[in-house]
Image (cartoon, rainbow, N blue to C red):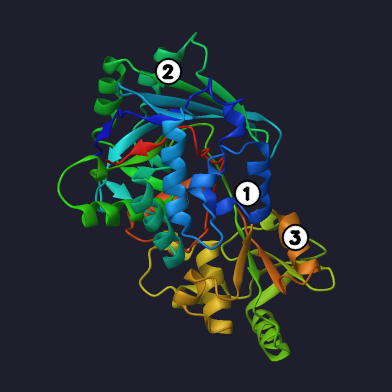
Amino acid sequence: MAEVNAFKAIHYDLAAIDSLAGVVAPPYDVIDEEDRDSLLAGSPFNVVEIDLPESPGGDPYEHAAGTLEEWILSGILRQDRDPSMWALTQEYASPDGSMKIRSAILARVRIEDYGPGRIRPHERTQPGPRQDRLYLTHATRCNISPVFSLTSRDAWPVMAPAITGEDPWAEVLDGEGTLNRIWRITDPEVHRAVSQELDTAELLIADGHHRYETARVYRDQIGGEGAHCYTLMALTALDDPGLTVFPTHRLLTGLGDPDLLDQLNRGIEATFETVAEGEAGPGALEGAGCFGLLEAGGSKRLIRPRDPSSLDDLAGDRSVAYRGLDAAILEKVVFSRILGMSEADVEAKKGLAYAKSIDDAAAAVETGEAQVAFILRPTPIEQVRAVAEAGETMPPKSTYFFPKIPTGIVFNPLS
């Protein structure tokens, strides 16, 4: 059972800042150094100063804690006296140009161990980000950024009447063109209705696996009962019409040795056949294990397995849903069998990087940042759910749910 509650949120005082748009940010794991600098140039109170802290010569986590305390004392941030839930709609242009709206409810959710009927992950995590988020949580004693979870039951219809005809608390147009509208809901009757609707729901973590696993560890380390037994989540129904999943493309960056690059090329030629030259996006190809391949010198082609039935031998006792994952096939066939990379290598991003778009992947190969790029298709949400229901986890970065939930709308205090 999912225990979903209102909470006494910490949030920006809109009267103390120029606009909420200037202080929110994308999730920490999609921000590079240039992005961070740009966000802080827009406002010294941008949430990245806490969520992605830097302190040359000092402890970045202590810096985050000190900054959070300073902003509360100075009135930049304030904590509500009464519990609330927060409604969020995100309007954006889909790849085909049509406009979509995705809805989410921001609330605190009791931390549970993974299992059927409770909370399920769908991706493996990496040790570095888990440790980083744990240090930050201990220092700030807050959830700074929400976990994005998909719910098997839809609570939005019981939330929607509370915001119909009401002006949003704030609006944020982000850098990717998504219009975020936020409402603060203080009505206890609405809180009870949402909690009741979701109390039998199963939650599937869509984005924020590292944050959720950090919350579990933090709960156990603190011990006992209290606010630390909950974590901040943005909850969206699995059948929400605005739910969109993009692919995350793979970059191989550790092929500086010509022999290793030759080993990769020979392995690909033996395992895959070329379908088309001068192409990158594999969306038109049917069947599992089809990729776009970008190589040095501007080479682009679409490839697919020569013998799809041979892929089953690499999957062991994995479920049918897992065996059909392009990301899993790429990991087993190319990374493991051809290049000898272990699962730990993949999790530690040893010789591996990621790109959100085909253009970014092509630029990385063109500049020599990467030697080869594999272009993947989006993973259907039904397949994500099927893998999770089988009790399995997908390779890291198998999905890119769009749009991202902004960091900085609300914080959840843990003490």
Which of the two residues, 277 or 149, is positioned nearer the viewer here? 149
Q: Secondary structure at mark 1?
A: helix
Upstream in sequence: badge 3 or badge 1: 1
Q: Amino acid at mark 1?
A: Arg
Q: Determine whether 392 is above or below 96 in the image.
A: below
Q: Amino acid at mark 3?
A: Ala
Counting every numbered tag in the picture gives 3
Q: Secondary structure at mark 3?
A: loop
Which of the two residues, 247 or 48, is positioned nearer the viewer here? 48
Q: Determine whether 57 is above or below 314 in the image.
A: above
Q: Amino acid at mark 2?
A: Ala
Question: Residue at coordinates 66% horizontally, 79% vertically from top-left?
Answer: 268
> Which residue is denoted by mark 3 in the rendering?
280
Q: Quadrant of the C terminus?
A: top left
Circles 3, 1 touching at the beta carbon (< 8 Å): no
Q: Which mark is residue 160?
A: 2
Q: Position of residue 278 (x, y in %)?
A: 83, 63
* Alpha carbon distance from label 3 to label 2: 41 Å
> Which residue is denoted by mark 1 in the rendering?
36
Upstream in sequence: badge 2 or badge 1: 1
Question: Residue at coordinates 60% horizontally, 51% vertically from top-left?
Answer: 31
Upstream in sequence: badge 3 or badge 2: 2
Q: Secondary structure at mark 2?
A: helix
Q: Residues within 10 Å of mark 3 (few under 14, many from 20)?
A: many
* Alpha carbon distance from label 3 to label 1: 30 Å
Q: Residues within 10 Å of mark 1 (few under 14, many from 20)?
A: some
In the rendered image, the residue lying farthest to the left is: 224
Left or right placement of residue 365 versus residue 320 in this view: right
Asked if one can make out residue 387 in the rendered structure from this viewpoint, the answer is: no
Q: Determine whether 254 is above or below 35 in the image.
A: below
